[in-house]
Image (cartoon, rainbow, N blue to C red):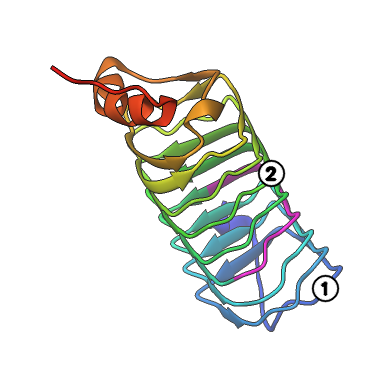
């Protein structure tokens, strides 16, 4: 696919339509690219340090080995997009809408998905540390092979959420996991935490 794309030169501008563009090896510091639409684009080894991409849209996009640090991705739209080997740290992605999106072999540190809508989203072999899903709507979201550390699921709405095969470190929102599926090993690990959350004392 990359061979059919037009290499990008220069910076990013707000309200632009980027179609069929290859972003490779670029570093965007404090980019102002709000309301942009990236269509049929590829990001390879790109870094975003800070920057404002609020309300940008990513459609049929591939991101590989790309880094977002302290970037504003709030209210963005993502559809038919794959992020492979990507790192997101301190990213604001609240109220984002994601449909048919795959995160693969990535690291997500302190990413704020609060109030977002995630539909048919796959987290595969990812590390999610201090991820916030508070108030988000999760439909057909899976976390196979992932490690969750201090994840916040408070007030989440879950429909066909598959947590099987993940290492679950959840700090809030146990009561919001109705509609999620876990395996028997996870149930054993979560039992003491669920009991504590429900005020149940277990003694022998």
- The tag on residue 14 is 1
Residue 195 percent across, percent down from the top left:
34, 24
- Which of the two residues, 81 or 149, is positioned nearer the viewer here? 149
Is residue 104 visible in this depiction of the protein? no
In the orientation shown, which residue stands out farthest toward the right?
A: 15
Residue 76 percent across, percent down from the top left:
73, 54
Q: Is residue 144 above or below residue 17?
A: above
* Left or right for 182, reference 192: right
Q: 10 Å neighbourhood of mark 2: few (<14), some, or many (≥20)? A: many
* Left or right for 79, reference 124: right
Q: Nearer the viewer, mark 1 or mark 2?
A: 2
Alpha carbon separation for disc pair 1 and 2:
22 Å
- Which of the two residues, 6 or 187, is positioned nearer the viewer here? 187
* Left or right for 184, reference 129: left
- The tag on residue 37 is none
Q: Is residue 76 above or below residue 177?
A: below
Residue 139 percent across, percent down from the top left:
62, 26
Q: Residue at x 66, y 74 (%)?
A: 8
Q: Is residue 32 above or below residue 120?
A: below
Q: Which residues are magenta?
A: 71-82
Q: Residue at x 83, y 63 (%)?
A: 35
Residue 133 percent across, percent down from the top left:
57, 44
- Which of the two residues, 38 or 204, is positioned nearer the viewer here? 204
- The kind of secondary structure element at disc 1 is loop
The quarter of the picture where the C terminus appears is: top left
Q: Residue at x 70, y 82 (%)?
A: 11
Q: Is residue 171 above or below residue 122?
A: below
* Residue that label 2 marks: 116
């Amino acid at each position: 696919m990359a061979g059919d794309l037009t290499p990008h030169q220069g910076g990013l501008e707000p309200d632009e339509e980027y179609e069929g563009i290859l972003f490779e090896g670029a570093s965007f510091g404090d980019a102002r690219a709000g309301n942009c639409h990236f269509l049929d684009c590829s990001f390879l080894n790109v870094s975003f340090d800070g920057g404002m991409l609020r309300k940008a849209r990513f459609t049929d996009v591939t991101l590989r080995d790309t880094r977002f640090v302290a970037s504003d991705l709030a209210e963005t739209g993502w559809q038919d997009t794959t992020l492979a080997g990507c790192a997101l740290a301190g990213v604001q992605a609240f109220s984002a809408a994601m449909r048919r999106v795959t995160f693969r072999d990535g690291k997500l540190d302190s990413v704020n998905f609060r109030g977002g809508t995630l539909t048919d989203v796959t987290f595969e072999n990812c590390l999610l540390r201090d991820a916030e899903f508070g108030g988000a709507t999760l439909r057909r979201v899976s976390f196979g092979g992932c490690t969750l550390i201090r994840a916040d699921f408070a007030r989440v709405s879950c429909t066909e959420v598959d947590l099987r095969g993940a290492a679950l470190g959840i700090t809030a929102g146990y009561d919001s996991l109705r509609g999620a599926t876990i395996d028997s090993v996870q149930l054993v690990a979560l039992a003491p935490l669920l009991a504590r959350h429900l005020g149940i004392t277990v003694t022998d």
